[in-house]
Structures are given as structure tokens and as C-alpha cells.
Image: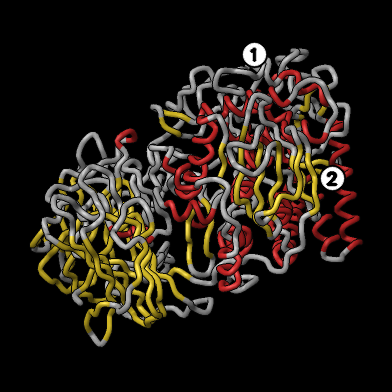
Amino acid sequence: MRPPPFLSLSVALALSACAPPPILDKQEILDRHTWWDNQDWDWYQRKIPFFESPDPDIDATYYYRWEVLTKHLVYGSPETGYTFTEFIDRPFWSGTYGSISCPLGHQFYEVRWLKDRRIIEDFARYWFETPGAEPRSYSNWYGDAMWATYMVLDDEAFIRTVLPHMERQYEGWIEEHWDPEHRMFRWDGMHDGMETNINSRQTADTFAGAEGYRPTLNSYLYADALAISKATALTGDSEKALTYASRAADLKQRVQDELWDPRRNFFLHQFANDEMDGIRAKSRTYETGKYAGNTHGRELIGYVPWQFNLPDPGYEAAWQYLNDPEYFSAPFGPTTVEQNDPLFYISPRCCVWSGNAWPYATTQTLVAFANLLDNYDQSFVDADDYFLLLKTYSLSHRMEGRPYVAEAADPDNGSWDGHNTFYHSEHYLHSGYVDLIITGLAGLRPRDDDTVEVNPLVPASWDYFALDDVAYRGHRLSIVWDRDGTRYGRGAGLSIIVDGRAIANASSVQRLTAPLPQRDVQEAGSDHVNFAVNNRGYFPLVTTSYSAPEAPPLFAVDGNYWYHVSPPNRWTTAGSGSASDWIEVDFGIPRRVETLKLYFLEDGGGLAPPERYQVQMWYGGRWADIPAQRRSPRVPTGRRANVVSFDMVETTKIRAVFTHRTGSATGLAEIEAWGHGDLPLPQPTAPVHNVAVNADGEGYPRASASFTAPVGGVEQVNDLQFGFTRYSRNRWSAMNSPNASDWVQIDFGGAKTVVSLDVYLFGDEERGERAPSSLAVQYWNGRQWLDASVRDRFPAVPAAWARNTITVDAVETDRIRVVFEHDPPGFTGVTELMIWEEL
């Protein structure tokens, strides 16, 4: 259960109202870019720091990466609040609501700069307070990320809340992956998110690899132990602080002793066991085995120790290889493996980490690079080298001329082909960027004291840059470089401006420090909850007057919103033919609502915001307009939240009625109904009219099938989980069935009166799953199966990736089945089957 916010919303709003005037014209900067999907200007202006530089490519990538964050923001439930996905879909290996632990460190480093405490706090708690969150499904640096977030927030209540989670995470790693004899953590590369790497390809399992002692996990847990030490010291437990500091120091020494190869000047993977072709336990990459003595074997993960300032002075020679085209440098690199390596390979498809450019590792390398320049004395690389790599990374975020990021790229030509699987890895949130701009290029170096430190890594040729309106340790902070003072009117040189007042200045770009002024209060998140979201349950139930088959209303209450056409996440009225339509959310129980948010679509392809709309509540057995509605914006606007606020009403149902624009249909990416409620929320006891539903798979209604492929399970057709993508795996499939037709049956365990069915057909042409050529509905009369009398089908021909609605003459029966005539050479798949009884 999510605790209340640390301070009241009214305090947060008051602080927001007192924010100093911006240095940058936020709307003018947003208007410079024409590629936006999410055009919620109010959201950006309220919630993100703004940045401007002389480099339009870096600026565009910076704002694009904030937009990517909105595509992956998920409101899971009122009890758990917000989290973030990694893929645009929710694959079968993800945790609850689609989150995956592999990128959580990168994601937290980005999210900590949001001016929205609610999102930050919910995401921090998600991993240990949400059942099924899977915080150790992949290696990550949760503990370090919590401390990094604390340094930005400067909120002791926050760190006290997450400290038990940090300790639980660390002890989990000890229990699962600690090798007490070797005194290091061991795991395979696949669980770094790094499948098919040069070390795994030397083992029997080329995809996952064998266990080893890797620079990744051991550096992460060095950082986690150090973070716990600092957090426990802050909270007064000096004994525990010393214990964890000692653990961190010991692990640091082991990384330097075991993983550093002085011959190759690099940190390398070390095998835990003997492997094939003569690889011996405790040998590093290419020290034994088929490639014994080879001078290569360097992977980008060798820079990860500097991501956490782990190495002592003396290891900096590793950095001579980074920007060298004989090693890692490439036009759209860096490459994950040095380019003359005997196993170097640029894969045309996902997922092979033996040479492709991987944004995950590039982000780590750039964080490490900034740390090196900030904290180490060396002569191998400088700020120009840093900017070159950052610029390369920025330009790799492109496809067909607009910002884009997917899982991996070809380092030679920047192509994402083969790595941007449909409805999966588009606009992929597996890496970082905005933190690189804030802490690296602009140089805001977070600290755990009341000194602000700035050390920009910008090119010497730049005459200006500004990082504006950063929420930092209870203040609003800006960093301004204006060579002659004419661009921003805040004086010449480099300035740190806090709460509208300059607290430090220098005539050149250099390291600056200054004491932060005192502050009285801390911003907090909202305690509102969204009553409309439904990620697995019957209620709240969303219904509509009409839905395009390929855009059913379930997408409008899944807690996610984005606006692009492909991949889709939308409910639309395309094909309705009516002048108006409505969408209704039935809570199943009275809820106290005071805000409705409508995320209208506008795509230039027949979808546009409505001409007008009205928000209504169920009152006294009929629909009534909610009085005194206050709207922002006043006119229905696409690609942003249309916020309707009103005095609190208590109602069981709420709906929006749309009058369509002439020649256009209306569509929504999401509908949200916000109000106050004590958590956990009381649950509805209203009757369930979808008589097929069985969310836990036990008892009745019971699903069965004539044939079920191993890819899924028939019990998934009535579990209230939807997944149209191949990676969701939430479906029944007849793949490779020997039958020309197959059926799925629901046994109600008692008589029900059935009037209609919704069959959500799955489709994946590449794997041979497609809509059937026909489908029929049959019912059991106690002796035999009979065809139900079909009154209507919509659509008329079965369609995959769509809701197929079949209306029948009312029939009383204890069993219904749907018979699918397969469309050779394809086979039928169903992600959900709903059977509706007479109301």
C-alpha cells in the first residue's frame, strides 16, 4: 500500500507558485521542434528542467528523451501508483504492469529530475511494495539509484522510506549470487541484459552464457553497499554504516585484483567455472580457451567501474581505447566490443551484444566518462572527447529524420532495422540521456551536502547554454553560460542561479561551488488516485457506445498513454457513423471524483478531438451533467491531457459524451478519473456480467480447448489480461494444431443467460498466427452442442488484433464454446474471451 505523501498537496502547489521566473522561454523552445507525439506543453513546462545550447541535435534529443519517458509512464493501480515500462508493450518476462528491473538504475537517474514527487516516490516503492515487481530479475543498481535520488531531493523522509528496500535488495543479491570463496558476485551476461556476448559465445549456452564475475554486477553492488552505508549513517546507525562501507571496500579491492588485466589495461569478465575449449575457472576473457593469449577481449562493460567511481587512481589507461576507431569508436558507436576482436560481430537483428551500438552501455560509459573527468587526474581523454561521444550518441537517436531510439543500432550506419520489433522496442526506455545533459554536459554534480557544485563539459567554442528550472535539494536552480551576457541578460560568464538569485559566477566555463541557501519546506506529491485504471480486474468496467474493432476501450484504461499511430494504444470511434458517441467507466462502487482527464488523439488520418464534449455522472438512476466544470484547455485539444475539474461528486459511474468534428472520429489514448480515497480502496460487490471471467484460474468458470500450443495456456483466455503482441504471451493459441478447426469452451458451472461474446483475436503473421476464416458460437443444451442463432457480427469478417463481437439470441446454458475454422497455413489465437449475460 502506498503511504501518503510527505507533505500536503497545498504546500507543493504553494511552492510551485513561488518558483522564480524562467530564464528560458519554455513554449518557444518546445515550438522549435516539429516531431512531438505528446504535445502536452503544460506537462513539460511544469515537470521537466529546460535546456538550451547552440547544438540543435543535442537539444532535440534532450526533449525527445523526456517525451519517451511519458510513453513509458504507467499508472498501475491506486494502491501502487506510478511505475515505468522498458518496452512499449508488456512482455511476458516483465513484472507487474510491465516494469523490468534491468534498466531501473538508468530510469531512476532520469526520473529523479522530474518536478513530480509523486512519480518519483511511487516508482521507488514499486519494486518492493508491489506484488510481482521482480526487483532482481536482472542485475541493477537499485540502492545506488535511491541514494542518487536522495541527493537531488534532499529529503530524509524519502531515504528512510526506501532504506529497508535497499537493504532487502542487497541481502537478496548476497543470498542468490554471492560466492563466499571468491568473495565476489557471480551471474551470467544475459542477466545483465547482455545476451550473446563474446564470453557467452565461448560456453555451451551461447545466449545466456555461464556464470562469471563481471565488472557490471560487482560494480553495481559496490555502489549499493556504499549507498546503504551513507543512508544508514544519515539515519543514525553508525555500526551498520561501517559494516556496509567495509563490504564496499572489500568488493572494490576484489574487482581491482581479479577483473583488471594489466596486460590489456582493462576490466574484463572472469569465468566462474571451467568451460568448453579449455577455458579454466577464474581466468579472464581470452586468458584461456580457444583464443588464449589474444590481445583483445575488451567490452564496453570494462568502463562500468567508473560509473560508480570504484577504481583507485592508476587504472585510467583503459580510456585510451574509447574514442579510437581501432577499438570502440564508430560513426554511430561506441561498439559493445572492440572492433578487432576475433568475436566482434554486428548483428542484423536483436539480441546480440558482440559489436552493435547499445544505448544501455553507451549511457553507462558516458556517466563513467563524466566521473573520470570530474574525479580523476589523467591525460588519456578530455572534455572534447566526452562531447564527441555524447554528440555521436545524440545523433544515433534518429530514424527517417526524426528522434527515435530502439534496442540496438548498427554502429556503422545508425540503422535500427532488426532491433525495433513492432509493438515492442520502439521508443525503448532501456538507457538514459537527460541525466547525461544535466550532470555531464551542463555539469550539475549532485552532492549529499548543502554545497552546489557545477563542472560543465561543454565545448570551448560555445558562447552560451542554459539549464533552467531544475528542482534540486528544495530549490529551483539554473546554470547559465553566456559569454558576453547578451543572450540571457543575467550577466556575462558562468552563473549558478538559485531561486532567482545568482550565488556564484565565473568569467569562464570551469568548476564552480557555492553554499545553498536555507529552505523551509520540501515539495511533495499528490495523494489523488485514479479510479478509472484497470490493469487486471472486472471493475472499473469501461464500455462505449461504439468501438472500432482494432481499437477497443480496454486501451483507454490501461494506465499508459501515447499518441502515435504505430504502435497503437487507443480507443477510437472510427467507423461509427454517429454524430456523437460516449465512453463510460463503471466503478462498481461509489467513488469521490473531482477531476477527469481525457487524452484525445489527433493523427491527421481521420481522428481529431471532438467538436465538444460533456462530462456526466450517474445520479438518481440516470445520467446528469456534472455542474460547474472547469476545463484546461477550454477547447478540446489533441495529444495532451484535457483536464476537467469540478467540485467533488460521489458516483458509481462517470462518462464523457463526444460530439464528433465533421468528417472525423474521436479517439482517446487514456481516460482518468481522479479523486481522494483511503487505501487500499474498498472493492466493488456489484454483479459481474462478463460470465466468463476467472482471474485466478481456480474453480469456475473453467476454460478448456480442443488443442493448446505450448506458447500459452487456455486458462489465459478468461483471466482479464490482454496482450496483442507476440511477447505478451497471454493467449491461447492453436499453433501447429493437427485440426482444421479448434474450439475454446467456457464451463460456467451453472446456468447463465448469454446474449453476446467479445473474442479478442491474436495475430502474428511472422509466426503463423492469424484470424480464423470463420468462427461459430455453440451452446450445450444438456445433451449436445447446438449452434447459437447469431444476430450480428462486428466486424463481419474475423479480424486479428481486434475485438470481435458476436451478438446472439439469448440462450440459457451452462457451457459456451467458440469454434474457429483456421485460415491455412495460419492458426488461430485468442488473448481474451468475454461472454456477456443479459443485464
Relative horizontal placement of residue 439, taking residue 584 as reference (left or right): right
Depth order, front residue of 222/27 = 27
Relative horizontal placement of residue 566, taking residue 202 as reference (left or right): left
Of helix, strand and loop, which one carries label 1?
Answer: loop
Vertical arrangement, residue 91 with respect to residue 482, above or below: below
**Residue type for callout 2:** Pro
Q: In percent of the image, x 64 and y 22: which residue is there? A: 337
Task: Using the rendered image of the protein, determine whether residue 690 is visible from the camera's viewpoint.
Answer: no
Tell me where residue 700 appears, x and y as whole percent.
Answer: 35, 71
Relative horizontal placement of residue 205, taking residue 728 as reference (left or right): right
Q: Residues within 10 Å of mark 2 (few under 14, many from 20)?
A: few
* Residue hosting label 2: 180
Q: In percent of the image, x 72 and y 63: which residue is there? A: 155
Of helix, strand and loop, which one carries label 2?
Answer: loop
* Residue hosting label 1: 325
Tell me where residue 10 appears, x and y as whole percent.
Answer: 56, 73
The answer to which image quadrant residue 382 occupies is top right
The quadrant of the picture occupied by the N terminus is: bottom right
Q: CA distance from mark 1 to mark 2?
A: 40 Å
Tell me where residue 779 appears, x and y as whole percent.
Answer: 17, 65
**Which of marks 2 and 1 precedes in the sequence?**
2
Depth order, front residue of 666/610 = 610
Vertical arrangement, residue 836 with respect to residue 147, above or below: below
Colour basis: secondary structure
Q: In percent of the image, x 72 and y 68: which residue is there? A: 520
Q: Residues within 10 Å of mark 1 (few under 14, many from 20)?
A: some
Task: Using the rendered image of the protein, determine whether residue 642 is visible from the camera's viewpoint.
Answer: yes
**Residue type for callout 1:** Pro
Depth order, front residue of 249/384 = 384
Tell me where residue 775 appears, x and y as whole percent.
Answer: 17, 51
The quadrant of the picture occupied by the C terminus is: bottom left
Vertical arrangement, residue 334 with respect to residue 119, above or below: above
